[in-house]
Amino acid sequence: MEAKLRYPLRIKAERTAYMVIGLVASLALPFVAMSFSHAQAVQVTGLQCNYATNPLGISEATPSLSWKIIALQRGQRQTAYQILVASDSAKLNEAEADSWNSGKILSDQSVHIPFRGKPLQARQRYHWKVRIWDRNGTLSNYSETNFWEMALLQPEAWKAQWISAPVLFDLEKFNLHRFDMINKVKADYTEPLPLLRKEFIVSKKIQQARLYVAAPGFYAFFLNGKKVGDQVLDPAFTNFDKTVLYTVHDVGSLLQSGANAAGVMLGNGWYNSVTKEVWGFDRAPWRNWPALKCQIEIVYTDGTTDVITSDGSWLAHTGPITFSSLRQGEYYDARLEINGWNLAGLDTSNWQPVRRVAGPLGKLMPQTIPPVRMNQQLKPVKFQQLVNGNTVYDFGQNIAGWVAIEVRGEAGAQIQVVYAEKTKPDGATDQSGINNLNVDVPFQTDRYVLKGGGAETWQPRFVYHGFRYVEVSASEKATINRITALAIHTSFEKTGSFSCSNVLVNAIQQSTEWSFRNNFIGIPTDCPQREKNGWTGDAQLACETGLTNFAPYTSYLKWLHDIEDEQKPDGSLPGIIPTSGWGYYWGNGPAWDIACIVIPFSMFEYTGDTLLLKKYYSMMKRYVDYMNARSVNGIVSFGLGDWIPVKTETPAEVTSTGYFYYGAFTLAKIARILGEKTDVATYTRMAATCKEAFNKTYLDTKTYQYANGSQTALSCALFQGLTPEKWTVKVVENLVQAVHQKDNHIDCGILGARYIFHALSDHRNADLAFEMITQKTYPGWGYWIAQGATTLWEDWRGEASRNHIMLGDVSSWFYKTLGGIRPDFEKPGFKHFFLKPQILGDVTWANARYESLYGTISGNWKKTGDIFYYEVTIPPNTSATAYLPGNAITESQKPLAKAVGAKRVGKREGMTIIALESGTYTFEARMDK
């Protein structure tokens, strides 16, 4: 409603301003540029290194630099740039820049500029700034100064040792090691999580201090009683036999003169899965007791240094977390807390020396993704007292996270919290749809034992749950004063927003955003409750929605490295990544494994980053070769198909072969981009062979039906570009008829749900796609919302998980079709893009915004009577092509022919095509009745 009311007022308020700007600009663009100071006319801002602002822990020898441009006049663009990089901010000038002075580089590129200076040194902070020359040759001021800091680049830079707490029983008598010891000895035994500590002296004035910390489970690091950072569930999950991530923290402000104490809580995380489950992480080859490797490097103002490392001098003690398992929950006994355990001066007479251990086998690498953080707190919207005395709280939103409680009571009193996504008829929590694979142990259950003596606050630390409801039971002598739900996710930026006049569409959009966030906790997952697994199919299907709404760039790059770690020499991949070994022989196949191509290529389309294509080219190539090796006459018949269809099943070989074609065709495009000429020819032929075989095998040229004529089979052929042009119209007609046969409802699984709406829209049937999406009866997204959904469900009835993202591509369709913001894949990264909104159903206005690497793109439209209003913003250094319905088009109340920066270039299908330079424009068009 706010957008609906604000939009006409916004247009009215800005018309006068645009008229003045347009009039002045039309007289002489050079004069306009001269009339502003450099800082006013063009500014350089938004500096990023490797997709991050001021990152710590860069390990690449040639980091990638990007910036944005702010300009008042339309049509502004960069014609040249100059970058300065220095090891000291005082040297960041043209005479003294000791790391790189690029000089004037003639280029319009302002994203992904590789560093070309002197070799970068470990631990060194590099300060940088940039200035540009605009379209008129006018030089801007320098940007603000940003920095990046290099990581520990060589293994010998690590002086620390891997350490772990002593185990509570005698290992000698078991004569077992690592995997065998953990699984046989711990079958009926779980140790409390350990506390580790070390005291040290700081005797001089500190210039800077860095903490480098690796803990393959999870950790919480404290210095002098204060937690380092606001991250949770750190570090992110990897295959610990291949890669172990460490994080870098600036801790200078947490150290003090004199005695200091470092305290660490270690969690099991994915490193030590302590309870049985079907995906084999309890039998993972890396599984072991929680371990730590860390070093604090201090640089003093006099130039001397100190390094405090994890070694045999650290001490250990059991902590108050008595049980912790990612899928089961966490138990905490506050009576076991040790006051001051992470402060200097503690009596440690009952602490024990740590064990020095071999640690995980994986290579240490800096974690460059944004950490998982708590991003929102929710209060209960209602609660219900059950007959048994338990209380069920409804937080009104399905989230990933946990609850924080404030309680009072006697020592030994207990609180239990059971998490669920739905409730039973009597109001109790119902885990039936999410606990079918973990039935032998308590599931999503946290427990707290009070220490007594006043108000106590607590929340779990090393687990998370998927839930909307919690059922709380308490001992008679315990009272809950307050309960709050804490939502978490990997803290990537929000880059997109979409809303429109249709309330149902907005609800679907919001549910999709929640589902994507809830299912990105270090890795892209399928659900935050039952599995928490990195299913490749779910990730590839939701990739474009993720790139449209958020900036998960470094998170995807991290996960691509995980994929590379799991790829076997023959090119095959498992269905979940990371994996302990499960998923190579079930749960995978082309529709899932194609994530290794869909994600890097989609990232390229949205960012223009060719470096990532080059980095993962061999991985993509190995997988396409693997599909080809398993194909028979161009047809691929292995792998899962259209998972969880409504009713009609589509042969798996149809969708598997469709992804084989996509893989070969896309690899040929990537090879062309990278200049791999031989591969261009090889994979072009491979794609052509597959396409010919697909149509020969599955297309009936008399009826123009593919396979069994299902919605998925038909839309797969259209979406993947397999249908020959001469038969496209007939195939589209069959697809439309297939939808009509289902009373304009969807009859697809997760693959068809991505294909069908784009296939219909791309062939002039967007109105039918809109009707399908907004159906309020079963099956569909509207049906879910009508049932009270606040996230997307795993199945069409809602009988399983109610927090999945695999059916979430609908959001990218909203942006492209209703919002009209469409990438131009010939000029990736939104260097050029299309603005082509469609007026569908009862929608009378829509607002869409996307923060590209070049700057803000927006398209806001409103239809009043037969007048179409359209306000668009194109960032400097880019251009766009807009498609407007109707005639008699004006811009800022002037005839289109007199508009500055806008040029009519044609008309197609009743749409006027306008080429736009950068700037903000306000159009009005009279639509044909």
Image (cartoon, helix red, strand yellow):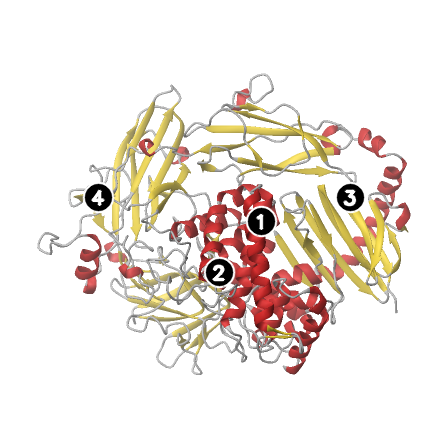
Disc 1 residue type (three-letter): Ala
- Image height check: is 39 above or below 669? above
Eye-nearest disc, 4 or 1:
1
Disc 3 residue type (three-letter): Glu
Which quadrant of the structure image shows residue 913? bottom right
Residue that numbered label 2 is attached to = 518
Disc 4 residue type (three-letter): Val
Mark drawn on residue 681: 1
- Pointer 3 local density, CA inside 10 Å: few below 14, some 14–19, many at least 20: many
- Pointer 4 local density, CA inside 10 Å: few below 14, some 14–19, many at least 20: some
Real-space CA distance between mark 3 and mark 1, rounded to the nearest whole angstrom: 36 Å
Which quadrant of the structure image shows residue 79? top right
Tag 2, which secondary structure? helix
Real-space CA distance between mark 3 and mark 2, rounded to the nearest whole angstrom: 38 Å
Residue that numbered label 3 is attached to = 917
Mark 2 vs 1: CB contact within 8 A: no
Q: Which residue, as the protein is rendered here, is positioned at the far front?
A: 633
Q: Earlier in the sequence, mark 3 or mark 1?
A: 1
